Amino acid sequence: MDRLVEQLVPDEHWELFRRVVPPKVVHRPQGGGRRRAGDREVLAAIVFVATSGCTWRQLPPVFGACWQTVYKRFARWSRERVWARLYRVILDELGSRGQLDWSRCAIDSVSIRALKGHLTGPNPTDRGKKGSKIHLICDRTGLPISLAISGANLHDSQALEPLVRGIPPIRSRRGPRRRRPAKLHGDKGYDYDHLRQWLRERGIVPRIARRGVESSQRLGSHRWVVERTMSWLAGCRRLHRRYERKAEHFLGFAGISAALICHRRLVRADARNQSA
């Protein structure tokens, strides 16, 4: 079991998680009762559910905690925004090492079939069936820097402003924290003059495809990176279809997937520095 836990939650990831996990809740100050399941083992079980796509009841007992305990811990951490804080800590580590490229960012969204729950809506591209949508902004190399969810019937243009505002102030190698890209690339779903004006007022150069001018057969020389990031998110099989009734749980799985993507880049950067 220890080898599986270390594989799913490496030491570097665990040290970052310990900085954001809330303190333990002691229900029996006088002692007694069953021993509390360790946070690292529970985190490994949550990562296993997220990446494998299995249900909570299908969680194997190898992690040492029952599925009810893992689910309750996941629900509490989602409610306390632990995944968002972990995601931001990893972004800060990447920014402080110069691994984020703010010169060109890209924005896009992907629709996912949803069975039930809040923030769902009829998908106009899937015969009106209920679905949710993941909105994403990534940097020039494809690292996600802002993430949000909505109903599938929300137009992409309505998510641009909240998504840009949602970019956290991220540490830089030199100078103050940064939260605005130099340029933002988007497809024709964001082709509105008021969005271009809104971006310019914030010092962001809009690079949005124009309807009736640019061909829809090409993603462009810069917008393809966000499509690749969407495929990286699909590596979290729990995001292939939304089963969560609560929107905060679905957003939690999306945050876990984004944190894993950024952490892999952090590990590769450390490996390159050690080899150099």
Image (spheres, rainbow, N blue to C red):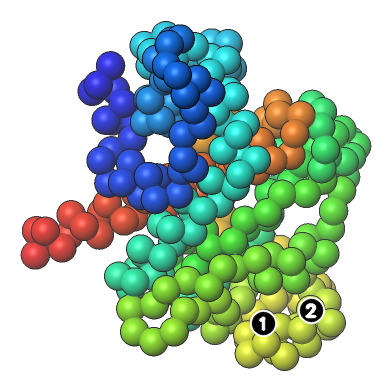
Secondary structure at badge 2 equals helix
Task: Classify mark 1: residues with Cα within 10 Å, few (<14), some (14-19) or many (20+).
Answer: many
Q: Quadrant of residue 98?
A: bottom left
Q: Which mark is residue 195?
A: 2
> 125 and 239: which one is in front?
239
The structure residue drawn at horizontal position 85% and vertical position 53%, both measured from the top left corner, is 154
The structure residue drawn at horizontal position 54% and vertical position 28%, both measured from the top left corner, is 73
Q: Quadrant of residue 115?
A: top right
- Quadrant position of the C terminus in the picture: bottom left
Above-or-below relation of 259 to 98: above
Residue 172 in sight: yes
Tag count in the figure? 2
Q: Which mark is residue 182?
A: none
Q: Where does residue 172 sit, x and y in percent of width and height? A: 39, 77
Amino acid type, mark 1: Pro
Secondary structure at badge 1 equals strand
Above-or-below relation of 77 to 215: above
> 124 and 98: which one is in front?
98
> 14 and 268: which one is in front?
14
Marks 2 and 1 close (CB-CB < 8 Å)? yes
Q: Which residue is mark 1?
A: 206
Q: Earlier in the sequence, mark 2 or mark 1?
A: 2
> 153 and 266: which one is in front?
266
Q: Is residue 242 left or right of residue 101?
A: right
Kindly report the distance in space between the C-alpha atoms of the residues bearing marks 2 and 1: 8 Å
